[in-house]
Amino acid sequence: MSTHVLASPVLTATSTDLTWAEIPALVLPALGDTLVMVGVTMAIVVALGVPLGVSLDTLGPGGLTPRPVLHRVISAVVSVGRSLPFLILMAALVPFTRFVTGTNIGIPAAVVPMALAGTAFFSRIVENSLRSVPPSLVRVARASGASPLQVLTSVKLSEAVPSILGGLTINTIAMIEYSAIAGTIGAGGIGYVAVTYGYQRFDHNVMITTIVVLVALVAVVQALGDAAVRATTPHSRRRVPRQRRAGTSGATPSSSSPTVQTSASASPKELTDVHH
């Protein structure tokens, strides 16, 4: 009894390089998998990373409500997630990933370690962004009678938005890189195509295409992130470099930035309006 096996140019390991006309049918679905993988991961990262970062800043020394013991516990957990290289973290989490998703291959299996690694990274970005807010703004808000929650939302988070968005851009690009690594466990995406077809089968056309697609994808994410940072940066900050180039660096602060109320009668809403 004979069996016929139909050989496809895409699936045959001994085939020659794919033609440029055949590559879109292979690469475009993989790009869709990468976008889904990164999109789901970043949604989880933002949902978990922002509260964690706020907790690290608020509970830490000099925070709005210091809790040293709780801060050390949260900080230790986050540090563990950041200390392991992604490939090792992905391998170590295989039993947990299988328990959560029911499988250890494919997009669901890749999202679990990517989300955990991304959350640990992004929470530190949020923490550092909140720490970068000038303490004088916090003191003014407290003097006006604002509660810790009002200070956090109206002053610290509001002032830290551009920095957080910049960190979110960096984190998203890192997740694109992680998705390529996740291709080694059969997660799909551009990384899987690059490794399976470009490297293992020595298909130079596929390898070049995947490199171009990844570079273009990162460039688009970076451009969108930069635009979001510019859109959320107060105009008073963006005018400073222009004034310096025009030779007005010696101008008094009152001529280049709005006056900040320092009286105890200023309300949290007024503080927000002044700084934005």
Image (cartoon, rainbow, N blue to C red):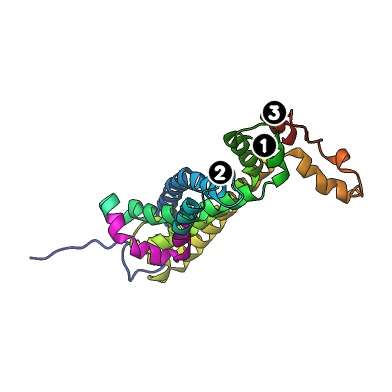
Q: Which residue is mark 1?
A: 142
Whether residue 248 is visible, yes or no, is yes
- Residue under the image location 64 percent in, 48 percent down: 163
Whole-Å distance between the Cαs marked 3 and 1?
A: 10 Å
Is residue 86 located in the magenta-colored stretch of the structure? yes
- Residue under the image location 60 percent in, 33 percent down: 147
Kind of element beneath mark 3: loop
Is residue 77 located in the magenta-colored stretch of the structure? no
Q: Which residue is mark 3?
A: 267
Q: Where residue 43 sits: x, y (%)?
A: 46, 44
Q: Nearer the viewer, residue 3 or 103?
A: 103
Mark 3 or 1: in front is 1
N-term-proximal mark, 3 vs 1: 1
Q: Amino acid at mark 1?
A: Arg
Q: Where residue 26 sits: x, y (%)?
A: 40, 55
Task: Say few, some or many: other residues with alpha carbon within 10 Å of mark 3 (under 14 / 14 to 19 / 20 or more).
Answer: some
Quarter of the image for residue 261 reads top right
Q: Which residue is mark 2?
A: 65
Q: Which residues are magenta?
A: 78-98
Whole-Å distance between the Cαs marked 3 and 2?
A: 21 Å
